[in-house]
Image (cartoon, helix red, strand yellow):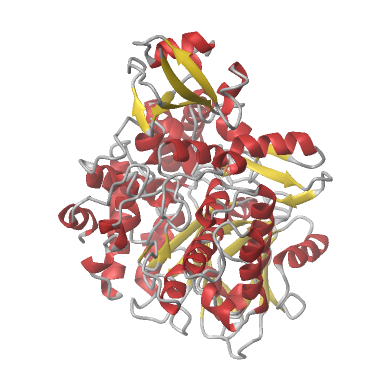
Amino acid sequence: MRFLRVDMNGLKAVVEEVPEKYRQLAGRGLTSRLVCDEVPATAHPLGPKAKLFIAPGAVAGTSAPSSARVSVGGKSPLTWGIKEANAGTPVAQYLARLGLKAIIIEGEPKEPGKYWTLVVTKDGAEFVPADEQTGKGLYEVYRGLKERHPTAGFIACGPAAEARMAMAGVCFSDTDGRPSRYSGRGGLGAVMAAKGLKLIVVDPAGTSPVVATNQELFKAGQAKLVEAILTHGVTKPGGTLNTYGTAALINALNEAGGLPTRNFSSGRFEGAAKISGERMAEIVKERGGVGMMGQGCHPGCTIRCSNIYPKPDGTELVSCIEYESDWALGANCGIDDLDAIAEMIWHCNDLGIDTIECGVTIGVAMEAGLKKFGDAAGALALIDEIRKNTALGRILGQGAAFTGRAFGVVRVPTVKGQGMPAYEPRAVKGIGVTYITSPMGADHTAGYTIAPEILAVGGKADPLSPAGKADLSGAFQDTTAFIDMSGYCLFIAFPILDIASGFEGMVETVNAVLGTSFAAGDVAKFGGEIVKWERQFNRAAGMTAAHDRPPEFMRYEKCPPHNQVYDVTDEDLDRIAGV
Amino acid sequence: MVKVHVYLYASLRQFHAGAGSADGAEAEAPDGTSIAGLYALLGIPAEEVKQAFINGRQRDPNYLLRDGDRVGVFPPIAGG
Ligand code: SF4
């Protein structure tokens, strides 16, 4: 395995042997270690000292199930702390097949405003000008690329990144070459653009799937994991993820009173049924055509939680509508129209922006009175401001916290400058701890306590009680950091939290590839190490305990229907977030 | 008798047309009916149920229904 070190100043891409200290790292473990080692904590995220790291997870490219995750790391222009954002995409598999443990992008481009494409094949890497793709929407860009490089996958930043917007993500292609799989959070797309790198074409032609060093151990682990995925209620074929997608959560969170509505002013949305996974599945069936539920984000996933949402005439509107995007651009903006939500997601994909940050920002803009809650046309008009790169668009493009400041809004649901995802912390206290204490800023995937608090998976915990929630979130954050290193989709956490042999299988496959000897009990310990590195980076970047706090309004404003404030104590938060 | 409003979600919707619709359905049950008793009354196979929320709170199958309760019933679900 090798590093590909890309110097955007000299336009050189050099293959390096992986130094010993990085050999047993991958995914988030590797990107976060590299950020700590190679990026000064006080560097400007868009400046010459900033770098971007792209690393497939440990088992990506092997035959392990649901294992095509790739991590992107850097210093975030949204939070100004460390950032790792991962995506499920065939590109993760392609990078691994090419023997690349990480791509490291560094150096200040010589010519401001000039963008390049890096074409990576088994024979090496070369630069070509990206003039043709610059300023264009990503659907058009990816269509053209697919014609020219039919066997390749793509990594790109969109027009919003070219405008250095802090909600710009790094976009990966899906199985059909769409610009739909995002390392969306934290503005890493803008970091890529600031390097003058518009696109990476990753062509695995002539390579073979990755074979684990210890094939016997790998096979044994794989069998256990597959068995767990196929038997667990939520991941088995025909289970809810497969049939209704992740948006099955809309009704669940709504029933639990934890579906943030109209910029986090309520935990219930009267229009929930209209934007639910159940309704989506009905529409897909009614409209037929290319519409489908149960799509996979890469070959080799049996869970297949994605979808293709059709227009009334059966042609494609967008792929895919995830719970988070559905909520952010739906309930959070008071919008109950799935077609409008789908259209907004298409625009986000095309512009290269994070749907969560976009929805939270529109919610704040609606709070500021720029548009009325529920006004779908108004929300689309705001996204159009981003597209046109107007002064308002540039404010919105910097995210919810920035927009809140620009318009004097007090109710701004962010932590460390990053918009909160689709769970109301005042109704689900543990996920609040994750939002508040994760080094990533408000991020549900960093420690998904929703599993025990709402879904009764991996135990049961009363969502409204603050008791024990700091420790619950802390344990989830540590374990998650390991899974984010493994290359597995986080959704394997559901079966392996309940089925011990599945958990063992996950660890064994990682050991078989990395040459490590982790026991099941080491997972949280090693994951905790990764989180510690990340917290140390944030401290060195100037973050203090004051950054590990909920938005103040959540401490005094009661959220209906449970009418609770956020009541996990500062002491508890400090205990988890302390370095 | 107690009157409750029942919503069935995801794969449970097939077991009761009214409660499985977007608007849910009113159901009447004798005083002292538990959640489990309600499943029997509506013909919902209990083994398909993962959990129920009553007025936004997770409750055990032996919880006794009260007049005006909002009942949301789910099979195993996940997402993120
Ligand atoms: S469960 Fe969904 S996100 Fe995860 S690997 Fe499968 S299709 Fe991709």
Q: Is residue A150 left or right of residue A43?
A: right
Q: Quadrant of ligand 1?
A: top right
Q: Is residue A236 above or below residue A490?
A: above
Q: Tell me where residue B73 appears, x and y as whole percent.
A: 47, 25
The residue at the far left in this view is A571
What residue is at 29 percent from the left and 40 percent from the top? A464
| Residue closest to the far front | B1
- Compared with A5, A226 (above or below) is above
- Quadrant for the C terminus of chain A, please: bottom left
Residue A159 visible in the snapshot? no
Residue A242 placed where, x, y %? 61, 33
| A218 up-or-down from A395: above or below | above
Q: Which image quarter: residue A483? A: top left
Q: Answer whether residue A262 is visible to the viewer in this image.
A: yes
The residue furthest bottom is: A111
Residue B67, quarter of the rendered image: top left
